[in-house]
Amino acid sequence: MSASSDRRIASLFGFLGTALLLVAGILDLLSGVFYFAVGHGGRAFGSFDQGLIFVVVGLIVGFFVATARMEGRDRTVVVGVVLLVLAILGWLALGFGSGVLALLATICILVSGVVFLVAGR
């Protein structure tokens, strides 16, 4: 496969991971609002915080994936490393393993990072 087709596949997985993270974040934000309306303040803030983290990290991943679509071997390698680090840190420290959508997003981001690294060879 050529480097441009590798970048295309990596971008597809990256944008899929971004979309899954954003959906998980929006669902957590909505559940936080619901818990707050019902009167469970502690649980509301936990869901709201996790949703906010998912949305922010999803936007960061989307930005880097969009940046990697441009030409440039060095840029592709850097984005691959950044995506791998974000996925691993997200799984270990940010709670990406807490739900099915976030876990699928982590897997997609990992695949995207590896393919970006391979495309930058």
Image (cartoon, rainbow, N blue to C red):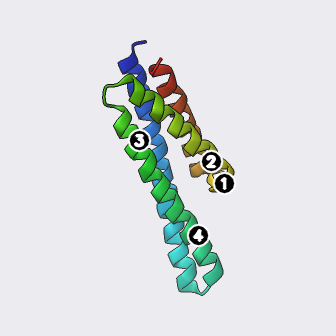
Tell me the kind of residue under disc 3.
Phe
Find the distance from the CA under tag 3 to the CA under tag 1: 20 Å
Query: Which secondary structure, mark 1?
Result: loop
Q: Measured along the vertical axis of the image, is residue 6 above or below residue 25?
A: above
Q: Which mark is residue 89?
A: 2
Find the distance from the CA under tag 4 to the CA under tag 1: 16 Å
4 or 1: tag closer to the N-terminus: 4
For mark 4, what is the residue?
47
Q: Nearer the viewer, mark 4 or mark 1?
A: 1
Query: Which secondary structure, mark 4?
Result: helix
Query: Which secondary structure, mark 2?
Result: helix
4 or 2: tag closer to the N-terminus: 4
**Residue in front for this viewpoint, 60 or 45:** 60
**Residue at (45, 35) in percent of width and height:** 79
The residue furthest left is: 70
For mark 3, what is the residue?
64
Q: Give the crowd class for mark 1: few <14, some 14-19, many >=20 residues within 10 Å.
A: few
Name the spot of residue 99 as percent of width and height, x first.
Answer: 63, 54
Determine which quarter of the picture holds residue 64: top left
1 displayed left or right of 91: left
Tell me the kind of residue under disc 4.
Ser
